Amino acid sequence: MLKSVIPRPWICSRCIRRQLPSRIRRNHVQAVPPTPLEDAVALGFKAARGQVATDTTTPGSQHDDKTLGQIFDSPGFWREYSQSSKSGHRAGLFQNRYLTSPQGFEQFANTSLERAKRVVAKILAASKPEEYQHVVKDLERLSDLLCRIIDLSDFVRATHPDPRINHAATRAYAKMYEYMNVLNTTTGLARQLDIAIKTAGSAWGEEERLVAGILKRDFAKSAVDLPQVDKEKFIQLSQDISEVGSEFVENMESAQPFIQFKSSSLYGMDPMLVKEFTRWGQVTIPAIGEASHAALHTVYDEQVRKQIFSAGRTASKSSLRRLHSMLSKRAELAKLSRFQSYAHMSLEDKMAKTPEAVNGFLQELSKDNRPRVESCLADILAAKRAYTKKPDSVLQPWDKEFYMSQVLSSVPSRLRNADFLSSYFSLGRVMQGLSRLFTRLYGIRFVPRENMPGETWNSDVRTLDIISETDGHVAVLYCDLFARPGKSPNPAHFTIRCSRRIRDGEIQEAAAIADPLFDSAEQAANDGMALARTPNGVMQLPVIALICNFATNPGSKTPSLLSFNEVTTLFHEMGHAIHSILGRTNFQEVSGTRCATDFAELPSIIMEHFAADPSVLSLFARHYETDQPLPVEMIAEKLALDKKFESVDTEHQLILSLLDQACHSQLALNPSFNTTEIFHSLQRQHGVMPPDPAGTCGEGFFGHLFGYGGSYYSYLFDRVLAERIWQQVFSGGREGGGLARGNGERFKDEVLKWGGARDPWKCLAGVLRDERVENGGEKAMQLVGSWGAERRRRDRLEGKGSKL
Ligand SMILES: *[C@@H]1O[C@H](CO)[C@@H](O)[C@H](O)[C@H]1NC(C)=O
Ligand SMILES: *[C@@H]1O[C@H](CO)[C@@H](O)[C@H](O)[C@H]1NC(C)=O
Ligand SMILES: *[C@@H]1O[C@H](CO)[C@@H](O)[C@H](O)[C@H]1NC(C)=O
Ligand SMILES: [Zn+2]
């Protein structure tokens, strides 16, 4: 249970992948005039033609839709709209009644702690059958009480601009954390759970049994069953791993941090960038970072690229030492906990279950991918031979980026005008588009709401109530989307409070205390935060915060305009949000995104398909000045360029996934365990592209080995699943399949609404209507691998770009 309480670091591959090396970026952007809009509109729009752009059926929802666009696109409108939040009595952060001042955090923590202690006493005292009946519900409540503080304060301390509130949140967090350590040594909880499962388990529903299983596994993982001496060793190892792991990630460095050249050696690279790094005719480039990345794409001199490449792939001795130490300690920890390897331990609660299954998936995917990489390699090699005029030249590792850029920039495209697409994507329109899409698919929409005084952490934050046609108010979404100095550039989705059923006993308990801070016992039971009365009882509503960093145009009338990549990112993050919104479970342990981590990216990656679908785009993408619809073939062109070398990226991800598996296998117990040898041999075995040269050790820069620890394959896995579901359930967008309510309902009923409360393989078999995957296992993992990540990708979308 304690494990589930620790906020799972929100691993969003989209953000993470952006930090990986060898992303293909196109340079040499030049303007080419657009084609007449009329042609464009006629293209590929059959499905959407004749549809009104809005979905709004009632005057009220039309008004909401309009307001939604304006609060994001019109600063003047927003100023007026947000007036009321500036005066009046303070509502408390997130409407939490305790949080009207920094001191409130302490009171909030104290109250929650008292509640938690009462719950613990109750669980430990259980002795009668009807008391054991309730143990899982009580443990879940305990976990929710801790989450309420930890999730919220973790968000606040990372985001709130007021240092006093920051400090108060940090203290509340520390207080709860300390209490968790006390609970760790309270062995009675695990014992009571065991008795409850044995004596009362048969009376529970499916969800409760599942939660019981999760709690039991978490207890087992925190070593409660071990003899005292092993338990101490376990705690020591866990602490060491977390320390050395963070050190590894924070101090990844090259053995040769800087490389020097005469400035003329960098011919080909953007002169402005070169100038930034030049002093007295000497250029000094950091081995890692924007400049060396750009150099690999653009510098003509092969020897120079070779030097830069090698420096960027050769980690320092101390980086490798930290990595080695982390991996061998993990292997020891697994052994101590009676697992074959750390991967076995970490995969137990994933869809994959075993390292063998992960391996089967990766092998099959690799088979599927290979011919595509071979064809890319042929193109890249041809480019090199043409360029060097040597028909027998071979491709070197440091040639890859350079010749890929050459191939891409030889394609004539209007997209070289970077502003062209973004004129159709003002933030307000994109938000309208998301709301309209969700209305079509799931019958829910975004309704802007005025903030109460003190409800948000910044006056920039727009609050949306999420309203369902059938269930009314289902969630609150705080959108903090505009760039500000000091704000993290990484987009992210946070759950501030999870969805869950508030049980009658909790409301009675609040009624008995009758705290004057609250208007009703129900309100007190949820600290004043959003709730809903449903036929099944009172629900605590999910409260979500979405953070992005979109540029604004201060002082200008132009709204914030998003690039297509930013649109895709926002759709992706909304995919997590919709999972939290629709995953309404009785137990917060399994609500929304709290599902198996190798299933968690599926809803968000699917949203990237929606972002590229012409019918979906026709719902909202219009020019912010002329109101002309977006010429969709431009998106096709953009996607074709982006996808050109996708298989090369897939190969890279495959090798990293295999490396992650090998590093967390039993091998790590071996005294001669050598990550460099493993990495290089995997490249030789599975790569079509040239392997890294001898002497380098690129694995020393693979920081995700710490965060993922045996589940790095998840990103590729969810990408395959998303592609399959997009094709099979949403017809790949054909005939308006991306907007059909029946398709949306199918995805919701089989996947989204369950959160983590159903075996994800059952979700998958249900939504795909494919029994072969119903029970998971190695065969099913192999089958998924054979589906491939990019088969039949958007065939109908390929307009001009398909010549690539
Ligand atoms: C308590 O358990 C959690 C989760 O298993 C763990 O992260 C934490 O380090 C433990 N604390 C102690 C003192 O054992
Ligand atoms: C919270 O509890 C601590 C002791 O546990 C106490 O010293 C402090 O005064 C309490 N704070 C509030 C605001 O109730
Ligand atoms: C690991 O293998 C590489 C390549 O064979 C070698 O250069 C390096 O010295 C080895 N590292 C250790 C610590 O033995
Ligand atoms: Zn994500």
Image: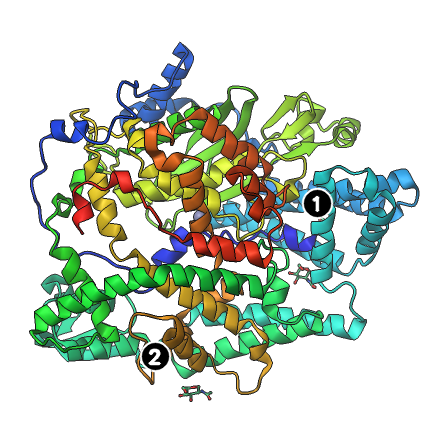
Quadrant in the picture for residue 589: top right
Q: Which mark is residue 522?
A: none
Residue depth check, mark 1 versus mark 2: number of the one nearer the observer? 1
Q: Taking the image as drawn, is residue 207 in sight?
A: yes
Nearer-N-terminus badge (1/2): 1
Classify residue 584 as left or right of residue 416: right
Other residues around mark 1 within 10 Å, as few (<14) / some (14–19) / many (≥20): some
Say which of 392 and 712 sits in front.
Answer: 392
**Whole-number angstrom distance, CA of label 1 to CA of label 2:** 46 Å
- 509 shown above or below 250: above
The local secondary structure at tag 2 comes to: loop
User: What type is the residue that disc 1 sits on?
Assistant: Leu
- Marks 1 and 2 close (CB-CB < 8 Å): no
The residue at 17%/27% (across/down) is 42
Q: Residue 399 in the image: x percent, y percent?
A: 20, 71
Q: Residue 212 in the image: x percent, y percent?
A: 74, 47
Q: Which mark is residue 314?
A: 2
- Colour mode of the rendering: rainbow
The residue at 30%/42% (across/down) is 794
The residue at 80%/57% (across/down) is 186
Q: Residue 217 in the image: x percent, y percent?
A: 71, 56
Say which of 160 and 32 sits in front.
Answer: 32
Quadrant in the picture for residue 501: top right
Q: Taking the image as drawn, is residue 101 in sight?
A: no
**Residue that badge 1 annotates:** 210
User: What type is the residue that disc 2 sits on?
Assistant: Thr
